[in-house]
Amino acid sequence: MQEGSFTWGRLEKQYRSHQKWVDGTWVIVLLVAAVLLFTINLGQLPLRDWDEGTVAQVAREIWQAPAGSMRWLHPTLGGEPYHNKPPLMHLLIAWAYSLGGVNEWTTRIPGAILTAISVPLLYCIGREIFRQRFCAIYSALIYLTMLPVVRHGRLAMLDGAVVCFFMLMMWCLLRSRRDLRYCLGVGICFGLICLTKGMLGVLLGAVAVVFLFWDTPRILTSAYMWIGMFIGIIPVAFWYGAQWWEYGQTFTNVGMVGQSLSRIWISVEEHSGPPWYYLLEILKYTWPWLLFLPSSLRLSWKNRNFSWAKLVLVWIVVYLIAISLMRTKLPWYVFPIYPSLALVMGAKLGEIENLPLLSSYPRPWVIILAILAVIAAGGSIYFSWGTASKSDLQLIFAAVAATMTLAAILAERGDTQFLRVLFWGSYISLLLLMKSNYWVWELGERYPVKPVAAMIQQETPPGTKIYTSNPENRPSLNFYSDRNIVSASIRELQYYWRYKEQPYFLLDEPTLNHLQLDSANLLDQAEGWKLVTKNTGRL
């Protein structure tokens, strides 16, 4: 009897060791795949407006601050107090600047690495809530191959870091059901979210609380949970207290209300949209995985008594309703919902993996895959002809077309290999897109900023304020030129020209002709913009 118990205990120990080895291998594989996809060609394209240019400028001013200054605590933008967001991400970028200099790669690498880490973190969450490893693997792979996740994760933004901290918080929360000491990690991660994007931490914390209230309410009364929250809130309270101490009511009006809370009831900078704005964002950018979403949601509702279904339903419903009711709408606000969509679809694909061989998968799946193949093939043909010829885009669309075609054929035959084809094809297609110069497609919507910035930097003294006729403020131009460039109306430009001793104007051709400036000295021109100043006889 004792010998049998010893044998079973030994076998169980070996089984657990094997499971840990397999999980560790998957974590490493997913991390390597994610780091490659999130960092390839990371520094070849200029920073975009608004987010990247602003974040980079704040980080550089922290890095350039004199030794012993409090710029790390009280960040600035163009020399003025920056109240928009807490500076955790800006500090990481400033640290990257100290190691590798100021460039696009060092600006984007902290966020890219944190977002890459979120991929194996999602696998770990899947291992906590799913019985089958396949569900966790599929969830992580879906998340890894979602276009908006890869694109926004590579940009110098705050959202990739927030999602990474939130997923680490959810993993600690799930682990705390077996070991309450993990509640300490929940509180610390909550603090990191708040130090990255302020009030968003409250919303994501609400998602965690609603899930616990439904699934494991006893954790809410755990002393470890309250101790962890206290530890996490201390640095947050310190930072906000330091801002109030330094700026007083100005920080409340600008930092708390104007830049954060007011986004709930007013449209900031005209970024508005209908309540279904984020549903359209999901509809536009989550193919081909979107074809599994309806059946995945039905599966989660059917299994709503299980923890995994409770988690994804709360995550999707609470967060999506909250951001949909906000008046300010921005595409990256929906970023934190993508991991939950990946989990719910991973559960469905795990179920498919265990089904017996079918004669065919649902007809709508095959039809949608075929339609995607036709659209991608059309894109490849379009970019191979005439003036629209672009070999990179031709290759990318060809890869997508081949993936969707083969996946449709295998799905029609009832072969589960169609899922492997979708994963590999989507990964290769995204890798080709990120290797190209088209992944930041917003750059093509405005004039190239770097030649104009180089002209300004060469022709104007450091610290000069430059007035431009462009009504749209471009933070990336401020960053690359290292000058403060301010939009001004025709009347304001006329006033500055008359009363300032040495004004510098960045003007388009029609505005320059309209102003008819006296004693104007054209310093240089680039990309249709002319840099002029007043000829005072000293030039």
Image (spheres, rainbow, N blue to C red):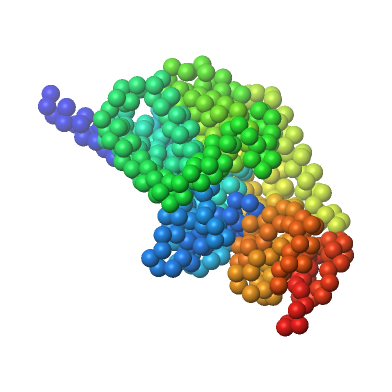
Q: Quadrant of the C terminus?
A: bottom right
Residue drawn at (67%, 28%) of the image: 276
- Position of 488 compared to 117: left or right? right
In the rendered image, which quarter is residue 362 located in? Answer: top right
Counting labels gives: 0
Q: Is residue 216 visible?
A: yes
| Spot occupied by residue 247 in the image (x, y as percentages of width and height) | 46, 50
| Nearer to us in this view, 359 or 249 | 249
In the rendered image, which quarter is residue 272 located in? Answer: top right
| Nearer to us in this view, 533 or 29 | 533
In the picture as drawn, the residue positioned furthest to the left comes out as 2
Residue drawn at (30%, 32%) of the image: 226
Image position of 75 with respect to 202: above or below: below
Residue drawn at (55%, 29%) of the image: 322
| Spot occupied by residue 231 in the image (x, y as percentages of width and height) | 31, 41
Q: Is residue 424 visible?
A: no
| Nearer to us in this view, 516 or 135 | 516
- Position of 95 compared to 141: left or right? left
In the picture as drawn, the residue positioned furthest to the bottom comes out as 538
Image position of 163 with respect to 300: above or below: below
- Position of 392 compared to 170: left or right? right
| Spot occupied by residue 208 in the image (x, y as percentages of width and height) | 42, 30
| Nearer to us in this view, 261 or 308 | 261
| Spot occupied by residue 154 in the image (x, y as percentages of width and height) | 56, 51
In the rendered image, which quarter is residue 268 located in? Answer: top right
In the picture as drawn, the residue positioned furthest to the front comes out as 499
Q: Quadrant of the N terminus?
A: top left
Residue drawn at (63%, 57%) of the image: 475
